[in-house]
Every structure is written in structure tokens, then in C-alpha cells.
Image (spheres, rainbow, N blue to C red):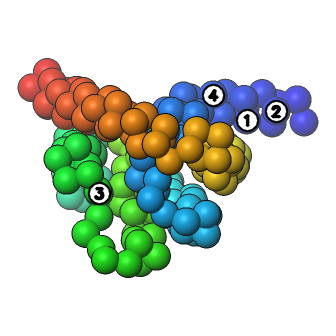
């Protein structure tokens, strides 16, 4: 039992750092700030389910697919960074991230960019890849699930945060957060390119 707990801890911490559940919350607020409480709940659920699906699929067949296609983790960094950069630029220029007349139909942001590459992106996939080589798959999956539950719980508290800050406060913070998101995206792209060149 002690060994299992220790192994869970050893796999939980790297995934927690890679997922950055707390850091994802402001971005979630930015992407869903104009939505209703129901819309935010649906988006949180969809983002978590998407992240779980992507993470689990990667655990099961990730190595085989990457080897078959000749894709490196660096490629994930560049692709994920480009997607996040586009989202940030679109929001900063147009004031919105999705093109939709009915915001209730905008839940797909829960899939991209929230579920992936934000919650489960290159950093998490890289961590999963490394952990699978050191620990049992069941333990790695359990740690992934625990981290996703934490992320989901934080996303579901977004309504209270919006209520506390107000829409004006969230809008102001969103602009700053999107600038940070753009910087994170550039960092991911840079790291991916340097890894390829190195």
C-alpha cells in the first residue's frame, strides 16, 4: 500500500506541474466570460472529458502512433503553441475567440483550445510519455484522473469568481491574461523549435 501511495505521489506531482490547473483558470474565464453560468458548466465538463480522452488515448497508443508517424514531443510543442497563439491574437484583436451568433453553441471551445492543448497539451503529453517509462500504466492513469478532477473543480468555481469580480473586472483581466497566453504560446513554439534544432 505504501508503495502505491508513493508511486501515485511520484506521478501526480509532475502531471500537476505540467497541467498547471490553477494557471488554466484565468484562461478559462477569458474564453467563457460572455457565457452564461450554464455555458461555463458545460464548457468545463466538455474540457475535462476532452482532456481525459486525449490523455488516455495518448497513454494507450501514444508511443506507437508517434513512432509510426515519426512525430516528436517537439512537434506537439510547436503545434500546440501555434493554436494558443491564434486564440490569443483573435481575442486581443476581435474581442472574441469563436465565431458564433449564439454563444450557447460555443461549447466547442471546451474541446479546443481548453481540453487540448491547454489542459492536456504538449507538457502533459510529454510528462505522460516519461512517466509511462518509469511507472505502471494504471498508476499513471490514476494520477491523470486526480489531476483532471482538480482542474474540473476549479473550472466549476468560475461562476463564483465571475460573481466576485463582475463582468468588467473579468474583461479587464482577460486582456492581460490573453497577452500572457500569447507569450506562453511563443515560449512553447520556441522550445519546440530549439528541441528540433538541438
Farthest-out residue, right: 1
Foreground residue, 57 or 39? 39
Q: Is residue 131 visible?
A: no
Residue under numbered circle 4? 13
Task: Please tell me whether mark 2 sits on a helix, a strand or a loop.
Answer: helix
Of the residues under marks 1 and 4, which one precedes in the sequence?
1
- Residue at 51%, 33% in the rendered image: 23
Measured as percent of width and height from the top left, residue 87 is found at 26, 50
- Residue at 46%, 76% in the rendered image: 104
- Residue at 46%, 53% in the rendered image: 33
> Which of the numbered marks, if any, corresponds to residue 8?
1
Task: Please tell me whether mark 3 sits on a helix, a strand or a loop.
Answer: loop
Nearer the observer: mark 4 or 3; the answer is 3
The crowd level at tag 3 (other Cα within 10 Å; few <14, some 14-19, many 20+) is many
Residue under numbered circle 2? 5
Farthest-out residue, left: 197
Marks 1 and 4, Cα distance to the nearest angstrom?
9 Å
Of the residues under marks 1 and 3, which one precedes in the sequence?
1
Task: Please tell me whether mark 1 sits on a helix, a strand or a loop.
Answer: helix
Q: Are marks 2 and 1 in contact (CB under 8 Å)?
A: yes
Nearer the observer: mark 1 or 4; the answer is 4
Foreground residue, 9 or 65? 9
Q: Would you place residue 196 above or below residue 62 in this image?
A: above
Marks 2 and 4, Cα distance to the nearest angstrom?
12 Å
- Residue at 63%, 28% in the rendered image: 13
Q: Is residue 96 visible?
A: yes
Q: Seen in the image, is 31 located left or right of residue 184?
A: right
Residue under numbered circle 3? 97
The crowd level at tag 4 (other Cα within 10 Å; few <14, some 14-19, many 20+) is few
Of the residues under marks 2 and 3, which one precedes in the sequence?
2
Marks 1 and 3, Cα distance to the nearest angstrom?
37 Å
Foreground residue, 21 or 57? 21
Amino acid at each position: 500500500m505504501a508503495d502505491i501511495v508513493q508511486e501515485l505521489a511520484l506521478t501526480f506531482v509532475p502531471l500537476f506541474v505540467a497541467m498547471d490547473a490553477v494557471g488554466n483558470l484565468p484562461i478559462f474565464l477569458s474564453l467563457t466570460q460572455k457565457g452564461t453560468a450554464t455555458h461555463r458548466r458545460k464548457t468545463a465538463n466538455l474540457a475535462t472529458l476532452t482532456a481525459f480522452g486525449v490523455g488516455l488515448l495518448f497513454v494507450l497508443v501514444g508511443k506507437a502512433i508517434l513512432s509510426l508517424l515519426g512525430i516528436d514531443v517537439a512537434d506537439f510543442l510547436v503545434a500546440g503553441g501555434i493554436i494558443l497563439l491564434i486564440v490569443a491574437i483573435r481575442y486581443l484583436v476581435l474581442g472574441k475567440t469563436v465565431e458564433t451568433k449564439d454563444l450557447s453553441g460555443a461549447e466547442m471551445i471546451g474541446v479546443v483550445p481548453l481540453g487540448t492543448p491547454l489542459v492536456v497539451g504538449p507538457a502533459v503529453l510529454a510528462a505522460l510519455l516519461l512517466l509511462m517509462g518509469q511507472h505502471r500504466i494504471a498508476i499513471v492513469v490514476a494520477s491523470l484522473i486526480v489531476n483532471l478532477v482538480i482542474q474540473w473543480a476549479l473550472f466549476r468555481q468560475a461562476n463564483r469568481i465571475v460573481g466576485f469580480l463582475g463582468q468588467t473586472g473579468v474583461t479587464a483581466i482577460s486582456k492581460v491574461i490573453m497577452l500572457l497566453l500569447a507569450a506562453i504560446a511563443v515560449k512553447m513554439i520556441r522550445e519546440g523549435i530549439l528541441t528540433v534544432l538541438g
